[in-house]
Amino acid sequence: MRLITAAISALLLSVASAVAQPRTTLDIYVVDVEGGNATLFVTPSGESVLIDTGNANGAVRDAGRIMDAVRDARLTQIDHLILTHYHADHFGGMEELSKQIPVREFIDHGPNVQPGAGADWERDVYPRLYARAKHTIAKAGQRITLKDVDWRIVASAGGMISPTTLPGANGANPECARFQPFDNNMEDPMSVASYITFGQFHTAHLGDLTRDMEFKLMCPVTRLPQVDLFLGLHHGVESSNSPVMIHALHPRVAIMNNGTRKGGDPRTMMSIHTSPGLEDLWQIHFSQLSGQEYTQPGMFIANLIDEQPAAMPVAAIDAPPPGAAAPPAPVHNGKAYWIKVSAQRDGSFTVTNQRNGFTKTYGR
């Protein structure tokens, strides 16, 4: 009996010690919200920043997937929630998520500029959410106050920081001479964009900033220093991800928040894979727009689809024209997996694919 009691006591002490173990890493969860965006940051002191909340047409599903990451991170609140812009694949799960966990601060770029669903949601829903919390309109150059991390807003509402704001910026960018513009909508260029520093580790999440904003940020000189990790990539769509941005940031690793038929097209994949110094691209989904021709090995891809095809397409496919006549995208409403990053102060970091347990560490 004494042996059993001693064993139970030792187990309880071990569990208590594990729970009390202080965090030492900046943890980043890239949550699968089916081609939308939801990226959760947790600092060593336990403070949290969530960028976006997934899709309106899957609000309950996406809020639940975010909450899975919240529970894994042992959070009891979201300290700062950044809404990058008023598109339904970014604000969609916010109301549902707010029912499940307190949000202390809502951050956005200010008034919506694009008529449609985003304007209706901003008018009818959003004020009820931030009425119970702090509401901040982000300005380029301001900081989000965190104990362990330097979080800088680098663009918001079309404004941006100066080239001399961040150490390591203000360099020449040879890609500017080869820049190719692309059409874009009204809200994407307004995105709240962030540059995050934790010791010697540097990462950036630029929301859905488009090619014209990438050019303004990085030409004729760079306003952003190089990064170890580049997040988001506007779902991997070709209206962003110009070499002007990706090559100048010189990331070692990129994580793309794409969907099964959203992002990952050949033009984007070529821009990423020709970036100097890139070691790996990780993807939230296998993309039909990539096919085998332009995709990553499966170990770097977090999510598949519910009904696997008999054969994987070799050639990339063209996205069907938008509208009611478009065939439905492959369904993925089953188990969803995140990609998790754990960064050390010395600049090294580990990336883990939750689906298959594949982990890779990038040292200094």
Image (cartoon, rainbow, N blue to C red):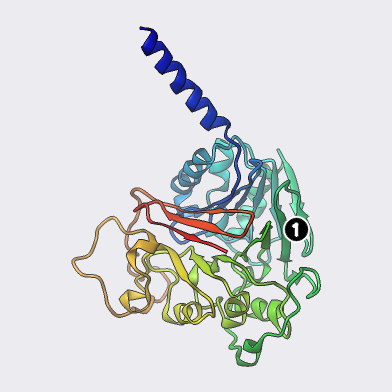
10 Å crowding of disc 1: few (<14), some (14-19), many (20+): many
Query: Which x, y percent locates residue 338?
Result: 44, 52
Q: Nearer the viewer, residue 259 or 29?
A: 29
Quarter in which the C terminus is drawn: bottom right
Vertical arrangement, residue 279 with respect to residue 91, above or below: below
Find the residue positioned furthest to the front: 3
Relative horizontal placement of residue 153, taking residue 330 as reference (left or right): right
Q: Residue at x 72, y 71 (%)?
A: 158
Q: Is residue 328 visible?
A: no
Q: Residue at x 71, y 60 (%)?
A: 109
Find the residue positioned furthest to the left: 310
Q: Amino acid at mark 1?
A: Ala
Vertical arrangement, residue 332 with respect to residue 47, above or below: below
Q: Quadrant of residue 74?
A: top right
User: Secondary structure under badge 1?
Assistant: loop
Query: Which x, y percent locates residue 122?
Result: 65, 54
User: Which residue was labeled with disc 1?
Assistant: 138
Q: Nearer the viewer, residue 121 or 6?
A: 6
Query: Which x, y percent locates residue 157?
Result: 73, 66
Q: Nearer the viewer, residue 38 or 27?
A: 27
Query: Which x, y percent locates residue 52?
Result: 58, 54
Find the residue positioned furthest to the top: 1
